[in-house]
Image: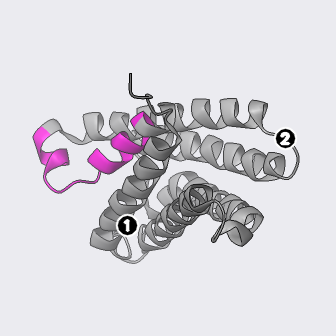
Amino acid sequence: MLFAVGSLCFLLGPFPGFIHLVGSAADGAVFFIGSIFFTTAALLQFLQSRGRDRIATAIQLVGTVFFNISTFRGMQDSFDSAGVNRLIWAPDAIGSACFLISGVLAYMAVRHLRSQDRTEWRLAAINLAGCVLFAVSAIASFVMPETGDALDLAAANWSTSLGALCFLVGALMLMPRRKPK
């Protein structure tokens, strides 16, 4: 449930028109709140993990902490381009790299299950797709020092939203199913 709430925040935050509706401060807060939900979920997942899953969940947890840093700093608007890249973009890029590494490790651990346990394999594949999309977002959000503009703001926004959608689907797949009465 915590991953689902965090995913919804990251799905909503870059959605076209949302920032104009609520303002940049509220939009930044949505991202920060989402990152807190991600970190809480990742911590609980790490504490419950065993064996080879432990490394992937530890790396994911570190990534969420970097997202906490970048989204918290992103709520401030007093940085020049170099400051944005150093204080916001760099932690975001590191967090995205951690997510990508953890996603690859999780996928590698279950890739052989494609024909046996399709749910676990699908979950890992969907989460890996979300990790790739978050990495695309990190690259696209690099701020060009000459202009002060993101490399590709539209790509940063759509890849964040699609990545969050993948994480939301993955989170919903983890939810326990009710058995019919």
**Which residues fall within the magenta stretch?**
5-21
- Element at label 2: loop
Q: Which residue lies furthest to the right in this view?
A: 51
**Is residue 77 visible from the viewing direction of this image?**
no
Q: In this view, does 50 lie above or below 98?
A: above
Residue 35 on image: x %, y %? 50, 38
Q: Closest to the observer: 8 or 107?
A: 107
Looking at the image, which residue is at 64% across and 71% down? 115
Instruction: Return the residue nearer the eye: 48 or 80.
Output: 48
- Secondary element under disc 1, as helix, strand or loop, is helix
Give the residue type at disc 1. Ser
Q: In this view, does 43 lie to the left or right of 88?
A: right
Q: Which of 21 and 1 is in front in this view?
A: 1
The image shows residue 51 at horizontal and vertical percentages of 88, 47
**In the image, residue 179 lies at what x, y percent?**
44, 28
Judged left or right of residue 44, residue 8 is left
Q: How far apart are marks 2 and 1 (CA)?
A: 31 Å
Residue 148 occupies quadrant? bottom left
**154 is within the stretch colored magenta:** no
| Mark drawn on residue 12 | none
Q: Name the residue rendered at 38%, 21% in the picture.
A: 181
> Magenta part mainly helix, strand or loop?
helix
In the image, which disc is placed on residue 159? 1
| Foreground tag (2 vs 1) | 2
Identify the residue under disc 2. Answer: 50
- Dot 2 or dot 1: first in sequence order is 2
Query: Total of numbered circles in the picture?
Result: 2
Residue furthest top as drawn: 181
Give percent across and percent down for residue 96.
58, 60
The residue at 42%/73% (across/down) is 140
